[in-house]
Amino acid sequence: MELQNKSNTGSSSSSSNKNTDKNNTTPTPNITNIANINKELSNLAEEDRELRQLHNRAIRDADGVTDEMVDDVIELLGLFGLPYVIAPMEAEAQCAKLETLGLVNGIITNDSDVFVFGGKRIYKNFFEERKYTEIYNANTLEDELGFKQETFIAMAELLGSDYALGIKGVGVVNATEIIAAFNGTHDGLKEFKTWLETVDEFDRQNKKLTKAEISQLSKKDQFKYKHRMYFLYILI
């Protein structure tokens, strides 16, 4: 009986050790599991990006003007005897018209579309306590950059605005170059559109021109040569 008890004890101890060794065994990584984890992380990152966009949009909308806020401002202006105008459509368009008529000295707005409507003297960040007020003068922009109202309209069409989708891949630098090459007029943009859609043999050729040869080209042809592959890539 004593031997039997010892035997049983030894057997139990041995079994316990085996179970302990089994529990301490490190599992071998599974390639499929790793791939699934990476996929899940990628999905979470995409979901996080979308949620951030929704969050930013919600903040922007929250900063917007509600009908109740408009009514309160109208009532306040009336109590102080201050004149006001209710714009039938876009506020910046109405302000630009008032400035053109000489009824106001400038326009307070953070919306750059005001230049598209013909605004001349713009005050930005006027109500921002943590920022300096910035003043932009359309006449100065025309003198230094050659930008007229028609130019700003072209910029809005190229970059995108409240009224235009813009062109994929075109930023401020490219838009400025396009305007310089095609004059930034409505007819110039139509010509640029035609060039994008046709991309003639001059733009497809692989021949590399020297700096001297490029300098002999017109501004328009210099632009076409410089961007021939870039815009082909965008169209693809």
Image (tube, grey):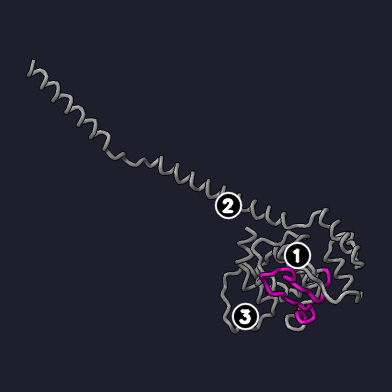
Please name the residue shown 67% across and 65% down the image. Answer: 199
Instruction: Give me the C-alpha separation between circle 1 and circle 2.
Output: 28 Å
| Secondary structure at numbered mark 2 | helix
Magenta residue span: 117-142
Q: Nearer the viewer, mark 3 or mark 2?
A: 2
Q: Position of residue 112 (x, y in %)?
A: 75, 68
Name the one closer to the observer, 102 or 119: 102
Q: Position of residue 184 (x, y in %)?
A: 76, 73
Instruction: Give me the C-alpha separation between circle 3 and circle 1.
Output: 29 Å
Label 3 CA crowd tier, 10 Å (few <14, some 14–19, many 20+): some
Give residue 35's quadrant in the image.
top left
Q: Please give the label number shown on residue 214.
A: 3
Q: Position of residue 140 (x, y in %)?
A: 76, 82
Compared to 149, does 198 lie above or below? above
Q: Are marks 3 and 2 in contact (CB under 8 Å)?
A: no
Can you identify the residue that label 1 sits on? 157
Label 2 CA crowd tier, 10 Å (few <14, some 14–19, many 20+): few
